[in-house]
Image: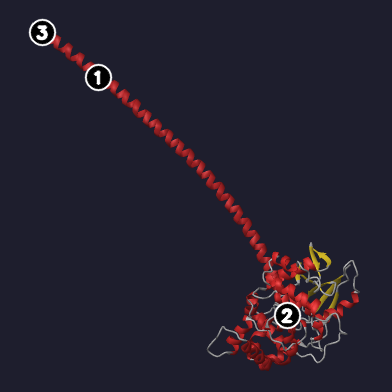
Amino acid sequence: MASEWRKLPLSLAELCIDTTLRCGQSFRWRKINNEWHCVLSNRLITLTQSPTHLSYKSTLPAINPPPHETTLPILQSYLSLGVPLTQLYTQWSATDPNFARRCSSFTGIRILNQDAWETLISFICSSNNNISRISSMVNNLCLHYGPYITTISGEPFHDFPSPEALSGPDVESHLRSLGFGYRAKYIADTAQIISQQRPKGWLDQIRNPAVPPADNPQFQPGEKPTYRKAHEALLELTGVGPKVSDCVCLMGLGWWESVPIDTHVWQIAQRDYNFGGKSKSKTFTKGMYESVGDHFRNIWGEYAGWAQSVLFTANLKSFAEQAKTGKKGKKEEEEDKENADVVVKKEKVVKQEVARVVKNEELTVSSTRKRKAVKEEESQQRDEDVKMEDVMDGLTLSSQVSQVSTTSTTTRRVSKRIKARESQ
């Protein structure tokens, strides 16, 4: 059961879903027929965007459907729409020349306020992995262990599985069979810790009180939670190191000063901020990790993780073309589309013309080959005829010579007889 489309006035500078939803924050959004789809809080949310509006609708499951009217507040919280993004870009550009150089091609990148449990498991999957493969793993978790919601264009959509669903005795072996490798044990162990060894709602107790969960604005935070306490608490879980912990803090717990440091960010720190001096060391200690994070927090302030996500995205190979050319306006995109349509039509005409020419050439070649074969056959026949004529000519000449020779002999004999008579 799907709702009608609804619109939110929102510029591309405040949110660009084509960048935000595929830059390595969430791994469950799928684009089908130019619409983005993801299951959030027991409903499928579908998004499209124009330069001035974000359009959305929700599709509810057949069993225990939530009310449609709760979709808007969930979406607003999930997309962190209360944060004035363009103001932050201006602020960061004024204090950081490197950010100012790169941000124009990557406007509208927001940090998503995701479910902490989903973020935790998703980034455990990210260890030594790429975005495409992480997305495949997360989709498999939902497909095999998450509740079914609906199907779009033949593709089933499931919600993210609960800790209890991933804590069964056969989960690890099953995940290994699905290609999770060593991450299978991390996921199964962490699910057991969260579901059996931590109090209910433990992850929410260590989240930023100023950033409530998207589907639970009335949550009760723990006693005086801080970013540092949350970061250290997550490190106690199986398969969680400093980077995964910071990813969960930033995108799942609302600690927006958190700066996850992976190879991309370490490259940025060395290349663009001369971090580490001339050594350019590839060895990364815990002390260096903390120093890089503190360095960026000093530059970008309390929203340091947001600024880091912009530079992180600009450093990804999948966004290399966007970094090179920059983002285009609607008019330019429409002109590009019209030009692309013209090119497609021209290419079609050219292909048809090439096909016609090739066919004609094939016919010409075939005809030429046939004529050549006929000529060769005729030539061969003429050669055989000439040879036969030569043979026949030889035989005639021999006969003629033989006849002349016989006639001459007879004439000589007659002449001798006449002379003999005359002498008598």
C-alpha separation, residue under disc 1 versus residue under disc 2? 124 Å
C-alpha separation, residue under disc 3 versus residue under disc 1? 27 Å
Which amino acid does the dot numbered 2 rest on? Leu
Tell me the residue at 57%/52% (across/down). 358
Callout in the foreground (3, 2): 2
Which amino acid does the dot numbered 1 rest on? Val
Q: Earlier in the sequence, mark 3 or mark 2?
A: 2
**Percent x, y of residue 317:** 62, 75
- Left or right of 409 in this view: 318: right
Callout in the foreground (3, 1): 1
Q: Is residue 398 above or below residue 373?
A: above
The residue singled out by tag 3 in the image is: 422
Return the residue found at the far left: 424
Q: Picture quarter containing residue 259?
A: bottom right
**Percent x, y of residue 393:** 33, 26
Which amino acid does the dot numbered 3 rest on? Glu
**Percent x, y of residue 70:** 89, 77
Q: How many marks?
A: 3
Res 60 seen here: yes
* Contact between labelled residues 1 and 3, with CB atoms less than 8 Å apart: no
Tell me the quadrant of the picture where the C terminus can be found: top left
The residue singled out by tag 1 in the image is: 404
